[in-house]
Amino acid sequence: MIETIDASRCPACRTIVAPPASYCPHHPVAMEPVSLPGAGEIVSFTTLHSPPTGFKAPLHIALVELEGGARFVCHGAETRGLRIGSPVAIEAVDRVYYFSYLGVVDRARLFWRRAGHAGDRVNAIARSLAKRVWKG
Amino acid sequence: MLDVWVAGAAMTRVGKRTERLQDLMAEAAHGALRAAGVEAPDAIVVAAMNPEEFLGDGNFASNAASHLGFAQAPALRVETATSSGAAAFYAGFGLVAAGLRRAVLVVGGEKMTHLDTPRVSELISRSIDPYERSYGATMPALAGLVTRALMANGVGVRELAQVAVKNHANGLQNPLAHFRHAVTLDEVLESRMVADPLRLLHCCPISDGAAAVVLTARRAGVRVAGIGQGSDTLALRHRAALTSFKATQAAAREAFAMAGFGPERVDVAEIHDAFTPFELISLEDTGLVPPGKAGRATLDGETTLHGRLPVNPSGGLKARGHPLAATGLAQIVECVWQVTGRAEGRQTQARVALAHSIGGLATNNWVTLLTAA
């Protein structure tokens, strides 16, 4: 399911950070709340084979650039076929964010699997993907 | 600003040590004072990253000063995560340069090997942004993200591995190094995956040790020619670039501006290779190697002991070891020995040395330039 991700924007430099922060990392000014669609592009990813206490191996961690430019840290169920630049959707499970790789097949599967009960979110994915295509 | 001189330098053997941290610090501190011919310092700057949690000891400036036998000397502690040693050196430099003190003992150390690896990893991770940490991000995890981005820029697995091969070869020549064995390219390439694409032999070990220097206003054998600090966001996700560290670039600019010369004058460098890709990134960030050329320079042997620019003659964090707050000072100790002809078995022809230290995931970095008098 595609999420709306809470973020903050600096009124001075327009930097967007997620999750929200009180102050811009680059300016001592209060940030404004904004929401971002939970879809973006993989900036980098790794798999931890000896994760810290409280996490199970293998632990996939990705840095995702959301639309609007904010970078977001999240987990993933798997990294097979994943590349830097891969389009991903971000979803929350128990308030923890996961990325899912939006390969052609996955995109279709995601669409059909969720079409029945989360149509609004599928629409959000479709909109965000359409926007990507439209933006080239 | 007064000229500041390194009058004495000493460090302990790095590795698994059974002594208390205070005793390791005493060994390094008394060694540096002896080498400097200074009986008692005017002030002490202590670096320890996290003795509260590693050891359960707090108020550590007074703890160390009392243990060293200088309970009445003004002492303070400096902490900037894994660059604490370099930060303490900066504080000591500032005290002498400002004319506040004439002879300052700077001592740094860490004791970690008595805890198991997951616990040590967790304690080191405390220096990471809390949100990123809540996703299981450890230092190797963030370094893994950096490494994958670096490889997407064209850095190859052989280049990353060759840094480990070179630094282990140097450590073999250093009697104080944690690792005194060679590793082959194949051993590095086949070592266990830690944080994909980062493998075990790309990573520095967990070490105990201490290092110390004495800084004086009185002329001595080595001058602090330049020193600079650079900072960046605590959160990796708040940065636009993963494959270069702004904190190093700023520190290098400041240090070279103070010194009045450029990277071309540097003969030898100690670089913060907690992970081998960091050596490649940092060689470019400091300006010692042109952008995009560090991997090639490493494969071509330019950074070996006998190359154009020897890098990490001590073995670096990779082989000398990384006792956190000792490391920034251990690098400076090696630089002092290199420019004064006391790096037995691994001596380079050097008059100008650069030490580069990374705090956290490059949130608080230092570049220090030392020249032979």
Image: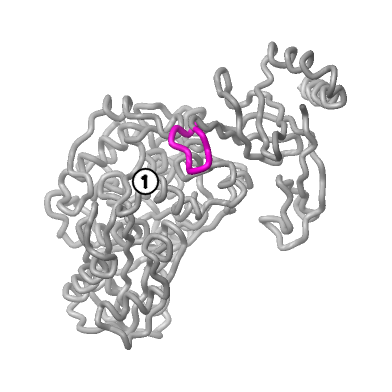
Residue A71 placement: quadrant: top right
Residue B181 placement: quadrant: top left
Q: Amino acid at mark 1?
A: Thr
Q: Nearer the viewer, residue B4 or B136?
A: B136
Image position, residue A132 (x, y; %): 77, 24
Would you say B308 lies left or right of A7 here? left
In what element is the residue under mark 1? helix
- Write the residue at 28% across / 70% down: B22
- Write the residue at 39% across / 69% down: B57
Image position, residue A5 (x, y; %): 77, 39
Q: Nearer the viewer, residue A17 or B120?
A: B120
Furthest toward the left, the residue is B345
Quarter the N terminus of chain A occupies: top right
Quarter the C terminus of chain A occupies: top right
Extent of the magenta region = A47-56
Q: Counting other residues with Cα less than 10 Å from the Cα at mark 1, is it few (<14), some (14-19), or many (20 or more)?
A: some
Q: Which residue is mark 1?
A: B117
